[in-house]
Amino acid sequence: MRFDGRFAPSPTGPLHLGSLRTALVAWLFARWRGAAFRLRVEDLDPQRSRTALEREQLSDLAALRLDWDGPVMRQSQRLGAYDAALARLRAQDRVYECFCTRAEIREAASAPHGDLPEGAYPGTCRALSESERRRRIADGQTFALRVRAGAERIAFVDELLGPRSGIVDDFVVRRTDGIHAYQLAVVVDDAAQRIGEVVRGADLADSTPRQILLARLLGLPVPVYAHVALVLGPDGARLAKRHGAPALAHRGEDPERVLARLAHSLGLARDRASIATPGELLAEFAPERLPAQAVTIH
Ligand code: GLU
């Protein structure tokens, strides 16, 4: 079994300390296992993605000396692979057109629906007849594509969070604007990059059952998962772009100091002395040493 790892930022904002910390943990996991570390730019959404931000993100990672193997994968160049995956789902009758508007979805999702979690899509368009579907398409109604998930409960054992499970609703695999959904792209790409271990922020733990289901339907290997506890801002809320984090490159901070702060927050460095390279942390690294709770970085 190989445990190649990856970091997959969206170039929609600078990498704040929380993202850099996740990148460091992902790098440590991969290198500690003697595995490759891949990089993927999740620039699926052309409206929100910026090449300048991508450049800054890569340069921040390089400044921290988080090195990666092989070429950077860009999702904007992989639309054919996502279409092929959709065709495969369609051949199994596992996708359907959803004509619901946002308001209709909100309204439908607010009512309880059997086992489905709150906010789940209840499957309004799942049972549309073939003729109704054709009529709406011929009328020019726009539609998203959803996967027919069958309200299955999917369980997995997270390496950091322990056993988790979730019931999967009929989630979107291609958006109304024609853009492939993150949930689809991430599964196709992790398989294409032969990722054995997905290390990422704990905010994505709840997406994992969906991704495992998709991997199974597509006949792709399911990686193991390690979701890293988040970083909180001074207001106790999850660190986000609104906490105003300019790219490292513009912060005028010494990357070695930043690395030391991140290492300290991970319980991997006893003092704040600067750490020159992430490799210096490998001797101290062990997944069970990572803090299980969200932390505030000082
Ligand atoms: N692109 C996602 C983000 O920046 C991460 C996706 C993943 O790691 O699966 O939040």
Image (cartoon, rainbow, N blue to C red):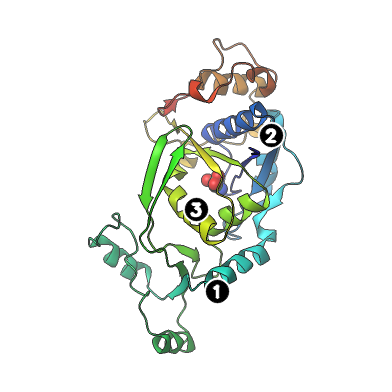
Q: What is the three-letter code of the residue carrying label 1?
A: Ala
Q: How many numbered marks, from 0 up? A: 3
Q: What is the three-letter code of the residue carrying label 3?
A: Gln
Where residue 87 sits in the image (x, y, percent)? 59, 71
Name the residue nearer the viewer: 82 or 153. 153
Report crowding for label 1: few under 14, some 14 to 19, many 20 or more residues within 10 A (C-alpha).
few
First in sequence, mark 2 or 1: give its number: 2
Q: Dot 2 corresponds to which residue?
A: 35
Report crowding for label 3: few under 14, some 14 to 19, many 20 or more residues within 10 A (C-alpha).
many
Residue 254 position by quadrant: top right
Q: Residue at x 55, y 10 (%)?
A: 271
Residue 283 position by quadrant: top right
The correct choice, above or below, for 175 with respect to 9 in the image is below
Q: Dot 1 corresponds to which residue?
A: 91
Left or right of residue 109, residue 163 in this image:
right
Q: How many angstroms separate mark 2 from mark 1 (CA)?
A: 35 Å
Where residue 45 sits in the image (x, y, percent)? 58, 59
Name the residue nearer the viewer: 267 or 170. 170
Q: Dot 3 corresponds to which residue?
A: 211
